[in-house]
Amino acid sequence: MQSKLDKIDVSYKPWLSALILLLADIISITISFLLAFLIRTKLIPVLGGETNLRVLVPLWLMLLVIIIGSFAFSRLYPGGGRTGVVELRELFSIITLAFIIIGLAVFIFRYATAFSRLIFFMSWLFCVILLPIFRIFLHNRGSLNAWWNKPVIVMGTFEESAKVVEYLRNARRMAFKPSVMLLIGSAPQEHLIDDLPILPYSRENLSQLRQKNIKTIFFASGNFGLKQTDLDMLNEISLIFPEFVYVMGESPLGSLQMKVFDLEGLPSLTVKHNLLNPRIQAIKRMIDLVVCILSSIVTLPIFLILVLAIKLDSPGPAIYVQKRLGRGGKIFDIYKFRTMYLGAESTLQEILDNNELLLSEYKTFHKLKNDPRITRMGKFLRKFSLDEFPQLWNVLKGEMSLIGPRAYIPEELGDMGERATIIHRVSPGLTGWWQVMGRHEKTFAERLRMDVYYISNFSLWLDIFIMIKTFWVLFMGKGA
């Protein structure tokens, strides 16, 4: 038993991750100010006036103090235990509030004439863009190191605990590292989870784990009706560990939209389904149209170049049209750049019939990682997800949205099961939650679950986060 305890990794260094994030925030705010200053300086021949960097230094210092202080107060250093969407919302709120406070101070103390309003506005704009981007990158890279992640105990039955361990490992952004499983009941002997120590629940093990400076415990339970013995056990745990997380299990409710309130001592949850709000849907549609129209200035020349490259690479049309399932299960034509040789669909069954490994892969993922039907240009297009460009026309037509669940093919309807009803409540997206969260590793069943997650947790903040992650995926060439 002691040897298992010795294997537990407690190399967590929150001070180091906090220092890295702190320096990144300072750099982001400084870059934002310098960019705004340089742009306004370049515009002097057009707008007139003058710029003075010395005048802006006090403004920069005040914003540093307010923003960094607010981040620290909100526990954004090191900032674990949050989804990216929640952190994005907090960052935007704090930065915007800081600029409002500084703006009011400048106005009240009559320093408005000394500051350029354009520099002030652009500094805010660059801050709300650069700060989240820097943090997304650092959380993504930092979570690969053991010292970045907080060690946690996962407690419950083997099946429920194993599921929570899997989710925690997939959600690296949360910066939780399952260090040990504490089981209620026995574990099947044939099941192991890598090198994760598995211990039986006991007061002695609880005390020894706490002595290793592990402060957080996850209690995995899908059972809401706890017995008195369970309640006594939870009370004992809460007295030993300062951070206690009760995992309620899978739910169709949108957890990002949940708010806790007290009902005469009974913890209660309220959930808002923003997806059903006509005003939110109208705003989402307006954003789709504005982004498509504005982006056409850049995308149209690229579109024409890619069409020529596809035509030169292999015979056949540059645009590929396929039937897909849209909102309400309605079938529509989706447009993509052709990435396969002509007749690829007719040869798929032949390929699967002659290779059992490829057949098993296709049944699991509904695609082939090294598909022999893909052209040379097709590999390039898929790597950077450029084959999706023509779907902007589907977005303009209202058949798709910029962000949403995957547009499934009609043949997949049977495999979608009852989740099809939920997924088809909204328009499919050009990009979406599962596409930016490790699309290569996701099975078809996992993609369905993640699409349902997006719909249940829909918010404009979630869409903004997905859009930021999409640009990162495109830049890194991590497309399918």
Image (tube, grey):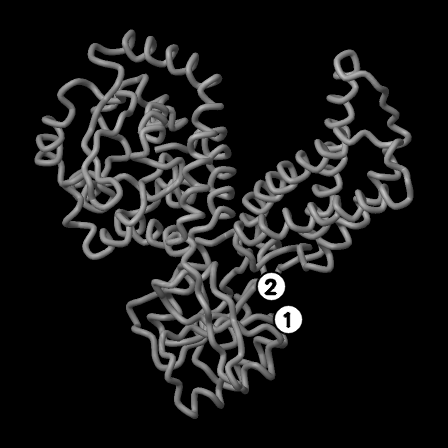
Quarter of the view holding residue 316: top left
Callout 2: SS: loop
> Which residue is rendered at x = 21% and y = 29% of the image?
333
Residue 81 in the image: x percent, y percent? 56, 60
Residue 23 in the image: x percent, y percent? 74, 43
> Which residue is rendered at x = 75% and y = 13% of the image?
46
First-in-chain label (2 vs 1): 2
Residue 421 in the image: x percent, y percent? 23, 53
In this rendered view, identify the residue nearer to me: 3 or 76. 76
Residue 304 falls left or right of residue 143:
left
Task: Give the residue number, with chain letter if any, for mark 2.
Answer: 10
Specify the quadrant that holds the C terminus: top left
Position of residue 183 relative to residue 288, above or below, is below
Going by the numbered disc 1, the residue's amino acid type is Asn
> Which residue is rendered at x = 40% and y = 49% of the image?
278
Going by the numbered disc 2, the residue's amino acid type is Val
| Dot 2 and dot 1 residues touching (CB under 8 Å) | yes
Quarter of the view holding residue 391: top left
Structural distance between the alpha carbons of marks 2 and 1: 8 Å
Task: Give the residue number, with chain letter if any, for mark 1.
Answer: 213
> Which residue is rendered at x = 41% and y = 58% of the image?
273
